[in-house]
Image (spheres, coloured by chain):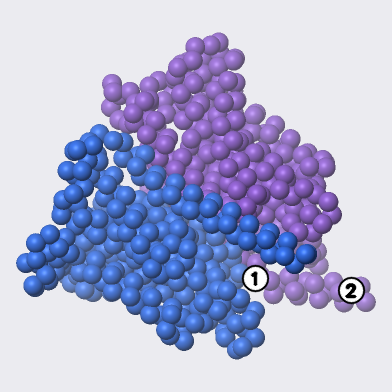
Chain colours: A purple, B blue
Amino acid sequence: MIRLKYFEVYRTAAVILISLAIAFIIISLVSSQPVETIRIFLFEPLSTLSRMGNVVEMAIPLMFTGLSVSLLFKTNMFNLGAEGIFYISGIVAAILAIHLSMNGIMHPIVAIGAGSIVGALLSAIPGYLKAKWNANELVTSLMFNSIFFGIGLYLLNYHLRDAKAFSNVSYKFAETAQLDKIMPGTRLHTGLIIVLVLIVLAHYFMYRTKWGYELRMTGANREFAGYSGMKTAKVIILVHLIAGFIAGMGGSVEVLGMYNRFQWTALPGYGLDGALVAMLAKNNPLSVIGAALFLAYIRIGADLMARLSDVPSEMISIIQAVIILLISAEQFLKFWKNRMLLKEAKLHE
Amino acid sequence: MNSLLNVILTTDFAFSVLRVTTPILFAALGALISNRAGIINIGMEGIMLVSALAGVVVSSYTASAWIGLLGAVLSGTAIAGMLAFFTLKFKTHIILGGVAINMFASGGTVFLLYLLSGDKGSSTSLPSKVLPSIDIPLLQQIPVLGPILSGHHILTYASILAVIAVYYLLKRTPLGLQIRSVGENPHAAQSVGVSVVKIQYMALLLSGFFASLGGAYMSMGYLSLFTRDMIAGRGWIAIAAESMGRSTTVGTALTSLLFGGAEALANALQVLKIPAELIGTLPYVATVIGLIVYAIAETRKKRRKLAQKTN
């Protein structure tokens, strides 16, 4: 007998299976050798150490933004601003990585710290507007994404751009600023340790502290939380500060961990992917790890598929869209839940 | 400053304002209709992208620009229908649904483009058609006004007619009344026998219809081919315009024109070495300021009402 409390787990599994099935259907329609292509998509990321490393590297920024968005969603804030903050904090970290000269320990700490603080402060703007005047945080955060991108791109093109480089990239970062690699044979960097620590801290914060409790209560019902004496405006601003700090740190870590020049001439998309990760993780910090690894895995699989077969990697965005549509669909498989409810009720009679 | 005026005070500039406003205006009208029915459709960008590609693909296979336009409109409306199905039937969160549509479109269009043309960047190898531009007799002979208003793309004129049509739809038709009532108070609308879900379906389909006209314009008028991510934020500007226009038809149309003017200015100012990246953020900055002003005014109004009640 299926237990009701695992319903969400089964539902998530069902969504993942359906999306993989759709991936297989698309591959079968497009590829001239579908079986081989599916094999590449599913298993090739595990074939070598460096490819497994690629999966984990890809999961690092997803964990940062996934965690950031989880906290906001848990407070019932529909803020999609992680995207712009990830970008502009990356720029801030890049500026400090280029222009400061420090030793190899302090340099990344200062650059990442500055990126995170800038992220926190910028994220607080929509939070403050929401808490104080009830301005729609979704629309303002979306507008700020475009604003931060414009400012960041301006800084890249007019102040950081290396005229000697062949493409639109910044000057080289100082060696001291770049994050250390932690595993030979891969490009895994110390950012992985940072994000894992952050996730554990966030979990503790959310489920073991008074602030975390207020955050969850405000998310469940802001008015009720207000009547019970919680200062919900303060909670909302606080959660925006924390979420911006995490997203900003993610942007800084990604830039210093994976590149030696700043080179994003479009928004990298990790902020919106963060929304997907948060949904898969049901806004639970610890589950963010698994959700980010899953998303990273199918993306690396799709990249390898594009390289080794005849199916382009853009297939993955179709799969991501299906996952988002189904996972946030309250009614999807509801009938199943209802049946389980009925069964349990009968058992207790 | 003088050179700035030299750029702006030309009929060419005024002409280009109308030219760049067209896609924004179409999408903003779409956003307006769905917003009035109480659902925020943030999938504008994605719907426009899909219809831009569909226009190019269908017109190149049928060798007819008009069938291409039909294909663009049908596919854009179908995407909106998909969004409506998931949000209204499966209760997917409308914002996340919109995010999904945008994700689907940005990758899906490249995927399809690559399969059809072997190129991930643009549709240069597809012999697609463009819709015609129209010279208006009599008007084109008038000095100043003629060169500004005549000779535009047919969809530019259609976008102006669309403003009138949407105004009439919302103000004067039963459907418009139902859309507004559903948006303002769905429970009240339900209680007098309006099917909320049906009206929201209609509103989302209409928003997809208008957005796809904007998308078709991008690849069959503004440019004569499809390029990757060619909507480049116009869907977001449209949402901003609707928001700044305070969900009124006239306000939305005027802000669209204003934002179109800002974009034309950004294009023109590139000659003067003023960073286009910064000018490009102006519509968004204006919208944030507009939202703040509105939110403050609303909060004050509410507090005043509360104060009156307690007295």
Marks 1, 2: nearer the viewer: 1
Q: Is residue B117 above or below residue B85?
A: above
- Marker disc for residue A347: 2
Residue at the outermost left position: B141
Q: Which of B100 and A224 is in front in this view?
A: A224
Residue A113: x percent and y percent? 60, 25
Residue B10: x percent and y percent? 16, 51
Total marks shown come to 2
Residue at the outermost front position: B311
Residue at the outermost bottom position: B193
Element assignment for label 2: helix
Q: Nearer the viewer, residue B189 or A261?
A: B189
The amino acid on which the numbered mark 1 sits, given as a three-letter code, is Gln
Query: For the point 48% across and 70% down, which residue is it?
Result: B34
Please state, as top left, top right, bottom left or bottom right, where the C terminus of chain B lies in the image. Answer: bottom right
Query: For the point 38% across and 80% down, which residue is it?
Result: B168
